[in-house]
């Protein structure tokens, strides 16, 4: 069966991704996180897509910098972001909250509020009738990583990652940056016995060597390779000089601190 959710990653800036997301049945389409207008416009032209909306995952300029130019070029009046980001997202016209739902053609879309990287961070969960699920996570969940805690707390990030992971093992994750190789190198450094990490790192390095994006892994793979979802790992805890008494939030905080200093 052909995919019902069309997702086209658009490389922007040095390592960002915007996304073109469309319902294959109706060709209704949106742009997720247009950090700059040029690459997005070229991708839209090449794909023959005309977007109806812009979806922003959070307010940072490397995710919203192209909002107003893209909106002007395509006559877009629907620019979506979290209600708490009012005044921080350029051109925002729709203010959503956790649990809000709407449609993109025949696709069902729901909002997860996922604070941690920023307090207004959200994920867009797109579901097709076929059972396909795509989750646009911004800078909250990366492949084998999570975003820095600029505004939120370890407890918030832990809860947010768990809410993303709860979307199902087959759900595909589309993050805001191409950080996969570096994230997996770090994951291997604190869990060297994890063979899934070794395999994923080799595959990611091969993709990047040919210029291919690494985005679109599954929640199942993230559970196997993402140290921020593996806070019960005895090897990770030992690598960070933690025992079994620390709760998952404390381990996540320790993993984040170690990742912040990893080079």
Image (cartoon, rainbow, N blue to C red):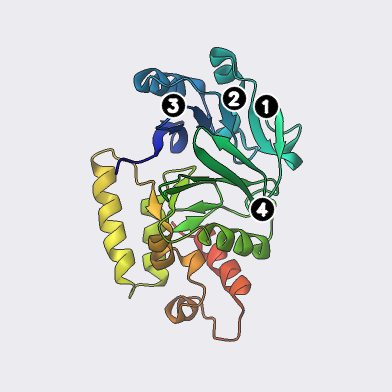
Alpha carbons under labels 2 and 1: distance apart: 6 Å
Q: Earlier in the sequence, mark 2 or mark 1?
A: 2
Q: Closer to the camera, 186 or 7?
A: 7
Q: Closer to the camera, 43 or 180?
A: 43
Position of the C terminus, as image quadrant, is bottom left
What residue is disc 1 on? 90
What residue is disc 3 on? 27
What residue is disc 4 on? 115
Tell me whether circle 2 and circle 4 mark residues in contact (CB < 8 Å).
no
Task: Please indicate, yes or no, whether residue 186 appears anywhere in the rendered image.
Answer: no
What residue is disc 2 on? 67
Position of the N terminus, as image quadrant, is top left
Q: Is residue 90 above or below residue 5?
A: above
Alpha carbons under labels 3 and 1: distance apart: 26 Å
Q: Which quadrant holds residue 73?
A: top right
Tell me whether circle 2 and circle 3 mark residues in contact (CB < 8 Å).
no
Q: Earlier in the sequence, mark 3 or mark 1?
A: 3
Q: x%, y% of residue 7?
A: 40, 37
Q: Closer to the camera, 100 or 140?
A: 100
Specify whether 110 is left or right of 240.
Answer: right
Tally of numbered tags: 4
| Label 1 residue SS | loop
Q: Is residue 86 above or below residue 149?
A: above
Q: Earlier in the sequence, mark 2 or mark 4?
A: 2
Residue at the (57%, 29%) spot, across then down: 54
Q: x%, y% of residue 154?
A: 65, 64
Alpha carbons under labels 2 and 4: distance apart: 22 Å
């Amino acid at each position: 069966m052909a995919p019902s959710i069309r997702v086209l990653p658009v490389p922007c800036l040095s390592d960002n991704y915007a996304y073109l997301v469309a319902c294959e049945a109706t060709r209704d389409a949106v742009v997720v996180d247009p950090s700059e207008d040029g690459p997005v416009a070229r991708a839209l032209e090449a794909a023959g897509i005309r977007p109806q909306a812009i979806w922003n995952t959070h307010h940072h300029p490397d995710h919203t910098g192209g909002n107003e130019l893209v909106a002007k070029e395509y006559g877009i009046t629907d620019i979506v972001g979290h209600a708490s980001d009012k005044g921080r997202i350029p051109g925002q016209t729709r203010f959503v909250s956790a649990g809000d739902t709407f449609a993109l053609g025949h696709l069902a879309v729901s909002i997860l509020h996922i604070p941690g990287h920023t307090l207004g961070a959200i994920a867009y969960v797109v579901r097709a009738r076929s059972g396909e699920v795509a989750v646009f996570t911004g800078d909250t969940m990366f492949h084998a990583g999570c975003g820095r805690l600029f505004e939120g707390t370890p407890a918030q990030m832990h809860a947010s990652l768990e809410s993303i992971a709860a979307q199902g093992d087959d759900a595909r994750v589309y993050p805001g940056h191409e950080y996969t190789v570096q994230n997996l190198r770090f994951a291997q450094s604190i869990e060297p016995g994890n063979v899934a990490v070794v395999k994923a790192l080799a595959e990611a390095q091969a993709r990047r060597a040919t210029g291919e994006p690494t985005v679109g892994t599954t929640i199942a793979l993230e559970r196997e390779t993402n140290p921020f979802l593996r806070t019960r790992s005895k090897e990770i805890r030992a690598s960070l000089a933690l025992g079994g008494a620390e709760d998952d939030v404390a381990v996540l905080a320790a993993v984040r601190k170690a990742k912040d200093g990893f080079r």
